[in-house]
Amino acid sequence: ESSNRAFLATRFEDPIERKCATLLAELYLFLLTPYSTCMTSELEVLSSSEPIYGLLQILGQDAQLHIVGGTVRELLVGKVAGDLDLASVFSPEKTKEILEQSGYRVVETGLEHGTLTVVVDGNNIEITTFRVPGPRNISKYSKTIEEDLSGRDFTINAIAFDINSRKLVDPFNGFDDL
């Protein structure tokens, strides 16, 4: 904050212009920070919801569950997410086995791409294994969410919310492009 004021002091010699610029900068920071905090809190609430919390309890923290895709994008811009997309380090076979043993209905909706649909209380939740970027017809699995996000089509789709740490993962600054 003090460095911003020092910068503004060198840019505007007139005290009234300097004060106006300082107030505008402070207003901008005030408006920006609550927005991002508010939108991230929507993701925190969603990650604590019964369907996701239940999946996390069954799959465990080693699954590295992340909320991804349109779900994150829509919540960050203040919209209601139409669907629920998760990503995990677990292979689709391992995810399916664990969930079916726990009584969940699992549909192989895109197994060739590592995608399963889990039916939880009548809601469809897609879980896709982290993927290595490459041709769509060839799926190789990744061990990190960052590598998976690097293969997304736009920076605004390359944002994830880590359910374990409850933090936004945004390696390509997609939040700035929203």
Image (cartoon, rainbow, N blue to C red):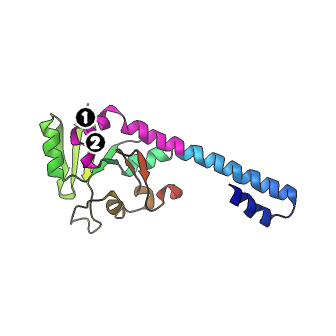
Count of numbered badges drawn on the protein: 2
- Label 2 to label 1, Cα distance in Å? 7 Å
Task: Indicate which disc residue 120 carries.
Answer: 1
In the image, is 97 to the left or to the right of 117?
left
Mark 2 or mark 1, earlier in chain: 1
Q: Residue at x 27, y 40 (%)?
A: 56
Give the residue type that dot 1 points to: Val
**Disc marking residue 125:** 2
Our reading of the magenta stretch's main secondary structure is: helix
Above or below residue 21? Residue 30 is: above
Q: Residue at x 21, y 48 (%)?
A: 116
Is 79 contained in the magenta span? no
**Most distant residue in the front direction:** 2
- Please, what is the three-letter code of the amino acid marked with disc 2? Ile
Q: Kindly indicate whether the residue at mark 1 contacts the one at mark 2 (C-beta within 8 angstroms).
A: yes
Q: Secondary structure at mark 1?
A: strand
Q: Which residues are magenta?
A: 37-64
Quarter the N terminus occupies: bottom right
Q: Residue at x 12, y 37 (%)?
A: 101
Left or right placement of residue 95 versus residue 156 in this view: left
Specify few, some or many for label 2: CA neighbours under 10 Å numbering under 14, 14-19, or 20 or more.
Answer: some
Q: Residue furthest bottom?
A: 135
- The quadrant where residue 100 appears: top left
- Residue sitting nearer the eye, 113 or 56: 56
Front position in the image: 136 or 98: 98
Is residue 56 one of those drawn in magenta? yes
Residue 162, placed above or below residue 17: above
Q: Residue 117: image x %, image y %?
A: 23, 44
**Residue 27, can we see it?**
yes
